[in-house]
Amino acid sequence: MVRGRRLSISLPPAEPYLPPRPSRHRGRLPIWRLFLIARRNLLGVWSEQFFDQPHIRMKVLSRNIFVFNMPPAIQSVMIGQPEVFERKSPQMRHALEPLLGDGLLISDGLVWKERRRVVQSVTHPSRIASLTPVMTAVAVETRDAWAALPEGAELDMLEEMGRFTAEVIGRTIFGTAVGRRATSTVVGAFARYQARISNTDLTSIIGLPDWTPRLNGLLRRGEVRRIHRVVDGLIEEVLNAAGGELSLVAGMASHPGMTREAFRNEAITIFMAGHETTANLMAWVWYLLSQAPWAEAALHGELDRVLGGRAPGFEDLPNLPYTRAVVEETLRLYPPIPLLAREAATDTEVTGVPVPRGSIVIVAPWVVHRHRAHWHDPDAFKPERFLPGAPAPARFTYLPFALGPRICTGQHFGLYEAMIAVATLAQHFRPRLRPGHVAEAVSRLSLRPGETLPMRLERR
């Protein structure tokens, strides 16, 4: 991981900015009220008390649900008992299986162990230095495309960042350009796919078998076909060697035990996971900077001093500590996957709390990252928390990429991609939120700033 040297950055005095979050209710609500809230936005089910308590136990219909917020319990669930808490929750499996098959995000057991070993080599940290020139090239192309627009042009920043990350994934991992039309297809289809996933999947909650049909499955098939069509085209180019030696996934296809179907599932997993979460992260970065002018000024000062108008390379990243701090604080406030849910394979205990077999056990970065026992002013946007020399977060309280054996294999890739994009584009533009638009943190498969994020471009 690239580490920043200790640099002095002075910030103008300002009251901390409190970015938007769903309102929090107090006390217990009846189950039917919680279901209504969850159908609209899963983040709304967390009451004010959740952000103080060490753990919560509840029962929804016949299913035991546990939420653990303290470091020893988080370590036990995410690291200490991998065989017990290896399997994703039924709802997550059913939500992703039509799109990813038995891909790494939802597989378990021997399939997961074998695939993990193959897939993690694709985005290994040792490869990042050789991949960043492509990230920079896409960032420069985006800068030039924005520069060709009229002053004050408006973009949907969520869609724009989705195109950016899809193009980066296409060129770095698959070795071929995706193109604006195809990236738009994927970004739009996946947004609609997520919108058609129910946050209140009663079939999963009451424990019906995995093969039980889900009512909204038919509604998602068209979006699956659109996404598969794009990724299948990339796969064909890889298998036909059209991507050349630049394709990092080509070696997966010839790996022992990697069937054509398995390769397809993992390629789709890499493509979808690699573009969606980072796109959301970067959209949130632009939003937060537009609302916190003191942070934006500090960022611009660093970029002007270190880069002086040129595009960044890998070697510049250690010298951009404030840029990195902005990205890391954004990941704290808006973790890409706000809820990590596992299904207990056996009866067990977590820090002395009995957990029966079949229980859903949750570690929620959304809650842990805003828990008052772990963070001062937890709802405030304070990039200085992550500057060199600041106290490090307590262990197991900062988990934007999960933890343990199932930690995101692309965490370094996504972090550096976001840094390069922000460092390139923020030297030339100040994106500004459309007046009157309210960004809303919405949890589906990932945490998104609503359906759109309209921002107009101001030149610096």
Image (cartoon, rainbow, N blue to C red):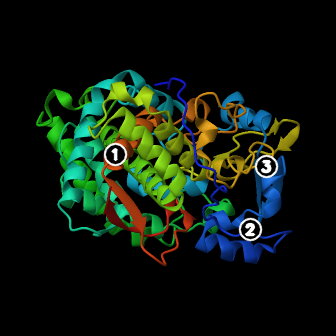
The correct choice, above or below, for 84 with respect to 52 in the image is above
Identify residue for label 2.
24
Q: Earlier in the sequence, mark 2 or mark 1?
A: 2
Q: Residue 230: where, in percent of width, then height? A: 23, 54
Identify residue for label 1.
271
For image coordinates 76% across by 66% down, the residue present is 61
Label 1, secondary structure: give it.
helix
* Along the line of sight, the residue nearer the viewer: 4 or 356: 4
For image coordinates 58% across by 57% down, the residue present is 91
Mark 1 Cα shell of 10 Å, populated few (<14), some (14-19), many (≥20): many
Q: Earlier in the sequence, mark 1 or mark 3?
A: 1
The correct choice, above or below, for 199 with respect to 359 in the image is below
Type of amino acid under label 3: Arg
Q: CA distance from mark 2 to mark 1?
A: 35 Å
Identify residue for label 3.
372
Marks 2, 1: nearer the viewer: 2
Q: Residue 21: where, in percent of width, then height? A: 63, 64
Q: CA distance from mark 2 to mark 3?
A: 14 Å
User: Horizontally, is 105 left or right of 265 in the view?
Assistant: right
Q: Earlier in the sequence, mark 2 or mark 3?
A: 2
Residue 255 visible here? no
**Residue 69, image quadrant:** top right
